[in-house]
Amino acid sequence: MDHPTLPSAADWLAKAGLRPTRQRLALAHLLIGDGKHRHVTAESLFEAARRAGDPVSLATVYNTLKVFSEAGLLREITVNGAKSYFDTDTSNHPHFFWEETGDLSDAPGDELEIARLPEAPAGAEISKVDVVIRVRQKAPA
């Protein structure tokens, strides 16, 4: 049962004008059902769906995450130019990328200062700035 203050998966999809297919509803519920923000990869969401008993293919998960991102429901963050993470918090904020585990977590945005950005090329505008700060555990002293 949905918490009264949390959007349902169907409401979340509706606000973006997306058709509530069975697969979309199942994945949306895994992403926002508990009201907590999360960072997922297609593989981690596929595994969560499998554990929840939702039969969706990995290709469907990839396609659905792309659709959710294009609709503004998720923010896609690419690390190392190849691996995509999808964040349910679409606000502008920095991230820590944990090198040992490959996890992505939120970094405190109020501690980040970007003094200046370069001019966008002619005929272009800056749409967003992704800040990914790579971190690793310190070696024992």
Image: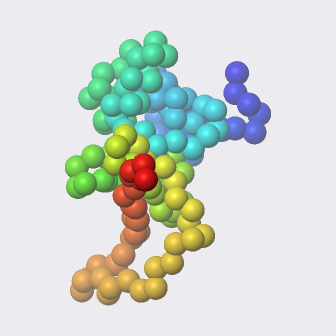
Using the rendered view, name the quadrant where residue 49 is placed.
Answer: top left
State the scheme by which the image is colored: rainbow
Q: Quadrant of the N terminus?
A: top right
Please report the residue visible at 38 percent of the width from the left and 83 percent of the height from the top: 117
In the rendered view, tell whether residue 106 sits above or below residue 54. below
Q: In the displayed image of the protein, which residue is found farthest to the right?
A: 4
* Residue 71 visible: no
Q: In the displayed image of the protein, which residue is found farthest to the front?
A: 141
Q: In the displayed image of the protein, which residue is found farthest to the top?
A: 53
Please report the residue visible at 46 percent of the width from the left and 79 percent of the height from the top: 114
Using the rendered view, name the quadrant where residue 60 is placed.
Answer: top left
Asked whether, in this view, residue 81 is left or right of residue 44, the answer is: left
Q: Where is residue 139 drawn, in percent x and y?
A: 39, 50
In this rendered view, identify the residue nearer to me: 102 or 52.
102
In the rendered view, tell whether residue 65 sits above or below residue 47. below
Q: Where is residue 14 drawn, in percent x and y?
A: 55, 40
Q: Where is residue 44 drawn, in percent x and y?
A: 39, 31
* Residue 112 visible: yes
